[in-house]
Amino acid sequence: MTGDAAEPERTVDAFVAEIAPGVLAPGVRRRDAVLVMGPWLAGTSSVLAALRNRLPQNTFIESTGLCDGDAPMAVVFVVSAVAPLTESDCALLDAAAVHTDLVVCAVAKIDLHRRWREVLDADRQLLAAHAPRYGAVTWEGVAAAPDLGDIRLNGLVEALGTQLADSQLRGRNRLRSWESQLAMAAWRYDGAADSSARAARVAALGASRVEVGRQRRMARTERAVALRSRLQQARVQLSHFARNRCTSVRSELQEDVASMTRRSMATFPADVRRRVAGVAREVDESIGEHLAEVADVLGLQTDSSFSESVSAEPVGEPPLTSRRVETRLMMLLGAGFGLGVALTLSRIFAELAPELTVAGAVLCILVGLAVTVWVVGMRGLLHDRAVLDRWVCDVTAALRADVEQSAATRVLAAETALTVSLAEHDETRSAVLAAELRTIDAELRQHALARARAVTARDEHLPIVQRALDAVRAELAQRGYARITHEEEGR
Ligand SMILES: Nc1nc2c(ncn2[C@@H]2O[C@H](COP(=O)(O)OP(=O)(O)O)[C@@H](O)[C@H]2O)c(=O)[nH]1
Ligand SMILES: [Mg+2]
């Protein structure tokens, strides 16, 4: 009995196996039941109940009654007469009728909607446009649970009864199942060979490959140029700064010298030493900071070799002592000047007060002496200021030479150290980029391989699948045509 029932399916399987040997047969279990389904609230449950009443010899189920891998003998697609079909309704039917050729459509609730015939016509056209297989399906208007009046189900019952009685039905359903299976297989072969996801990935990999290559070429030169220009800048700025500091400390010291007294002279050399040392330290720190910043900006490791300071020359004593001849000459001139003053005063005194000659002489001598001491002292101070001024100039000139040399030496040391560091850095970076390139290339090779495999598989299998698909479709069309003519003859 079961053998007889499965005969049409076996005939179809043999028909396809002859055209496409080795293609996997659809793994569905045919249930001897009619699936009644449709969009939410279309009236499915009411139609199902009414059909069970009218056709008790047949089994009717809703989609919840089907297990995975089950396929119904026929599908009754119920839609409401309230509005025409939507695209998602069509998709719902597609999913339900993947393995079933017999589809009958019902427009429900025609008692409520007087323009149901227009909706039915619109639905028929929409569904036919959605897929050619639905071009010839039967459409009936039904009222399975009317608010008023009788149930109207005759058209649907009649169409369903006739079509279920078709001796070709099992074969047609099997052919439809094959058609879906083969179309899916063709789609898979095509998709695997021309995968858009893979194409996008390959394009992205190609772009990264170009970018990595560019980085590899450019990074080295770009950074070398940057290092050179930054060091050049540092050299100019540091030497300018050193010169400025020396000039300003010299003017400050010269101002001090110009207003110097004998008392402050003793502490002056120590003061000069302290300030010179201060400037040297300041310039030194500035050089260190500047060079560290250059290294930092270029992202290089700072080496201690260029942060060490170059010590300034120690400052000697001012040459204030060796002026014996000058002192003697000055004493002589001072004494002459004092004598002149004393004689002039004594003359004036003798004329003004002749009775005080002795006292006047003593007073004049004292004044003459005082003038002598003052003149000699003043001249000495001025001389010492001049000497100290020259000394300050010498000391600051030496300081300037020192700090400039220090700046130049340390920038040079920095250049050497940073160039070495840059070379090391470049090597590591270049190794990283090379590794990146290798990874990209490996993935690209894999994609190319996968694509080649998929293309080979498609070229090998797709023509067979396509041939089988064409044959199945032709057979379905022929049997469908036969069904329609048979039904028309029957009327
Ligand atoms: N007037 C009228 N109402 C109906 C008809 N069929 C179903 N209904 C109503 O439509 C609603 C949904 O019906 P139901 O059969 O449960 O639809 P389902 O959600 O698709 O299963 C219910 O309120 C029914 O009373 C009909 O032919 N005429
Ligand atoms: Mg329901």
Image: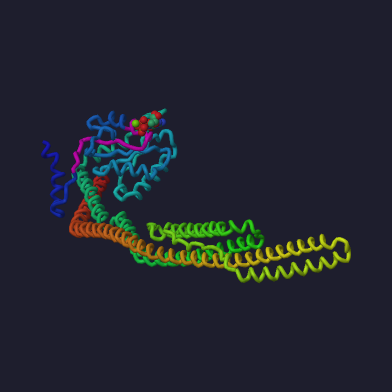
For residue 328, what is the image quadrant? bottom right
Residue 12 versus residue 152: which sits nearer the camera?
A: 12
Magenta residues (range): 27-47
For residue 302, what is the image quadrant? bottom left
Q: Which quadrant, please, contains the N terminus?
A: top left
**Relative to residue 70, is residue 393 depicted above or below?**
below
Residue 364 versus residue 452: which sits nearer the camera?
A: 364
Does any portion of residue 478 appear in the rendered image?
Answer: no
Q: Position of residue 417 (x, y in %)?
A: 37, 62
Q: Position of residue 395 (x, y in %)?
A: 54, 65
- Residue at 59% across, 58% down: 268
Residue 244 versus residue 163: which sits nearer the camera?
A: 244
- Residue at 42% across, 57% down: 296
Q: Position of residue 265 (x, y in %)?
A: 61, 59
Residue 400 versus residue 178: which sits nearer the camera?
A: 400
Examine the structure image and report whether residue 29 is included in the region drawn in magenta.
yes
Q: Position of residue 257 (x, y in %)?
A: 63, 62
Q: In the image, 11: left or right of 94?
A: left
**Relative to residue 168, is residue 447 depicted above or below?**
below
